[in-house]
Image (spheres, rainbow, N blue to C red):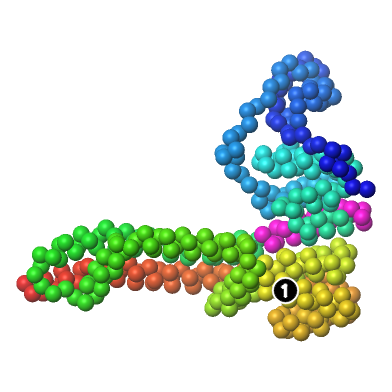
Amino acid sequence: MALTAAEKPRIEKAHVYAWEGLDARGTRVKGQSRASDLALVRAELRRQGVRPLKVRKKAEPLAFLNTKRISPKDISGFSRQIATLVSAGVPVVQAMDIVARGADKPKLQDLLFTIKADVETGNSLASALRKHPLYFDRLFCNLVAAGESAGVLDDMLNKVATYKERMESIKSKIKKALFYPATVIAVAIVVTAIILMFVIPAFKELFTGFGADLPAFTLLVIAISDWVQEWWWILLLGAALTVYGGIQGWKRSDRFRRIVDRIALRIPVLGPVFNKAAIARFARTLSTTFSAGVPMVEALESVAGATGNSVYSDAILRIREDVATGQSLQLTMRQQNLFPHMVVQMTGIGEEAGALDELLAKVADYYEEEVNNAIDTLSSLIEPMIMVVVGILVGGLVIAMYLPIFKMASVF
């Protein structure tokens, strides 16, 4: 029977308290504790054999200064720490308390203390995590639930931590590969805009008194400079609206996301990297969930949301529907015309041998290594290409301004 809002336990917000006291030997000690009120701090200190002398609540940081967000790395670290403590025989509630007190981010501490309080009321860890979908996705919660039901929570949390670390490693490598060229291009655009708006007008005034015809290239650059000076606000507004529209479209429109994901898979050079990354996520996620004892149909539903690309997500959901009707995973994957032949064959061998999780793990290892190699190659190719583009862009403007000077020098 579901509890009403009045019957549900109220979770107090935890605060940080600084305290001073005397231990059992009469030595003065001090420290910090986190609790919902001062009385609980005093009770906890007495339980530890400390006679409190001074206890005061520390000032809370301003909301706009508390900008440290909870990252996926924090979540994987939490999983690893809880797994270590549980495997050592520490109860889940006490393990949550230890990890929460050691967290260095206030937001993470609040989250973990909230989950701890929820578990203390009798809820399972999986059900407590499901109340925070922003940090614990369906896959995470399903694996924890499987570990709790099988009595192997520590092993499952270790698998979750390893899985999270590998997925974040792929994401960070792709972001790193895209960050450098994006940064260089942005700087080149800013430098070009400064030259067009401030440097070229100065040269234009200088050329006015030459009394000679200017080269066509110089006239073109001056015309572009005049247009940018007059309509710069349209360019700025257009860029801002494009970025805003893209972000909103990505958040609100499934169709827009599908179009972007489909284009991303077909981009020269970058497309193969995105394809391999999606296949690596598919194989790693399915291997992890299947080895945890999650039923195939339910596992595929979690896998669909973990690929990071809607084209693959839609294909996996179609595979799930076919598998639910009794078809083999290998056959349904082949029908999608999306997965490489090697992946389909390895899946088929795994199904026949009863070692699907092991073979998918090998597929994931292979494609993760492929992604790493592709990104290293891409980084070595992009750098000279970007330098050439920036050199042509900025160097062309400089040459356009010095052509009239060279022409006048040749006349004299």
Q: Is residue 15 left or right of residue 193?
A: right
- Can residue 254 be seen at all in this image of the molecule? yes
The quarter of the displayed image where residue 255 is located: bottom right
Residue 133 point in image, percent of width and height: 74, 53
Q: Residue at x 60, y 64 (%)?
A: 250
Residue drawn at x 79%, y 37% is 11
x, y percentage for residue 137? 75, 57
Q: Is residue 168 left or right of residue 179?
A: right
Image quarter hosting the C terminus: bottom left
Classify residue 399 as left or right of residue 270.
left
The residue to which callout 1 is attached is 314
Residue 61: x %, y % from top left: 60, 34
Figure check: 144 above or below 45: below
Q: Is residue 151 rendered magenta in the image? A: yes
Name the residue at 78% across, 65% down.
302
Mark 1 nearby-residue class (10 Å; few <14, some 14–19, many ≥20)? some
Residue 351 seen in this snapshot: no
> 344 above or below 362?
below
Q: Residue at x 93, y 48 (%)?
A: 1
Viewer-proximal residue among 150 and 70: 70
Query: Does the stretch in magenta take in 194?
Result: no
Q: Position of residue 327 (x, y in %)?
A: 87, 81
Res. 188 image quadrant: bottom left
Element assignment for label 1: helix
Mark count: 1
Q: Amino acid at mark 1?
A: Asp
Q: Identify whether 369 is placed above or below 331.
A: above
Residue 304 picture quarter: bottom right
Q: Which residues are magenta?
A: 148-168
Q: For this rendering, which residue is in front, 172 or 219?
A: 219
Q: Main secondary structure of the magenta part?
A: helix
